Image: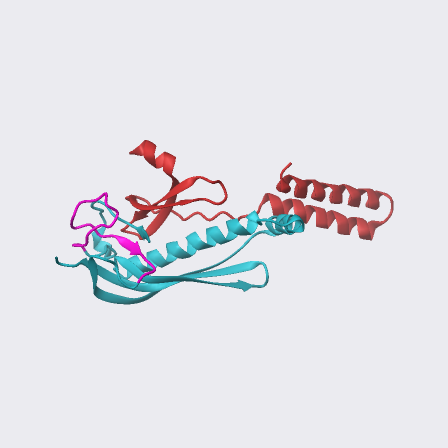
Amino acid sequence: MTLRAIVFVLGGIAVAAGALLVSGGSRGPGIYLICVGFTMVLGTAFERWRYRSAPPAGAHWEPTGERFEDPTTGETLEVNYDRTSGERRYIRASDNAQRS
Amino acid sequence: MTFAGAGGPVGRQSRGLRPPRGILSLDGRSAKKRVAVMLVVTTENVPGYHVRDVKGQVFGVVVRSRGLGGNIMAGLRSLAGGEITEYTQLLEEARRHAVDRMVKNATLMQANAIIMMRFDSAEIGQTMSEIVAYGTAVVLERASA
């Protein structure tokens, strides 16, 4: 089970526990737990951490020779550059090899 | 040494963003001439090239943060120790974002290289990370033999 799944489960448990408390008559602590649980679940589900540059229309991507290993996926990435707009993009080296 | 940019012709020259020609690509895959590159190096000099024009300082700055879920996961992971991959991801994304902005700014200045590139970092509000990539935008030209 990934850590992300654990956070989801903890959030779900908090919501369920809060619902039980509310049904048992403890409205204040129950609502508090429900809010915390929902915040955990929604904050994990809709987290935006991945950076992606917006590629311009009609970009002419050129390989730069810059390569590095993505610490998240372990894949080798290559950097392409569009000299008209100055944008860079990151693509998997395996994908780039297939194209060329 | 990292570098970005080499290759063939590109349209939309009328926007004035195209770096000057006559510069040799350093990636070894391109022809000997006319290739404009955006070379990013941490050194002051590039062997085989000389600085024809200094465009000025160039930078890329970004402040990024993990979301609530990422921070919770990082907090749980720190209980056991080891690499906190959530924050490794955060800094890697911030690095790319800052370098991309710096390169774009250098392109706008019609430079074809950034020399003396450096990173600086700071923390804002405990969960936000600021990364600044900066250097000197220049026009490099192949030194005559």
Q: Does A48 sit left or right of A90 as displayed?
A: right
Q: Nearer the viewer, residue B86 or A17?
A: B86
The location of residue B15, given as percent across then percent down, is: 24, 55
The location of residue A61, given as percent across then percent down, is: 30, 44
Is residue B59 in view from this perspective? Answer: no
Residue at image location 38% in from the left, 54% down from the top: B100
Report the magenta residues as a range.
B21-43
Q: Nearer the viewer, residue B35 or B65?
A: B35
Disc count in the image?
0
Residue at image location 30% in from the left, 48% down from the top: A82
Q: Colour of chain B?
A: cyan
Q: Does A45 sit left or right of A65 as displayed?
A: right
Q: Nearer the viewer, residue B82 or A3?
A: B82
Is residue B63 in view from this perspective? Answer: yes
Image quadrant where residue A62 sits? top left
Q: Does A8 sit left or right of A32 as displayed?
A: left
Q: Which chain is red?
A: A
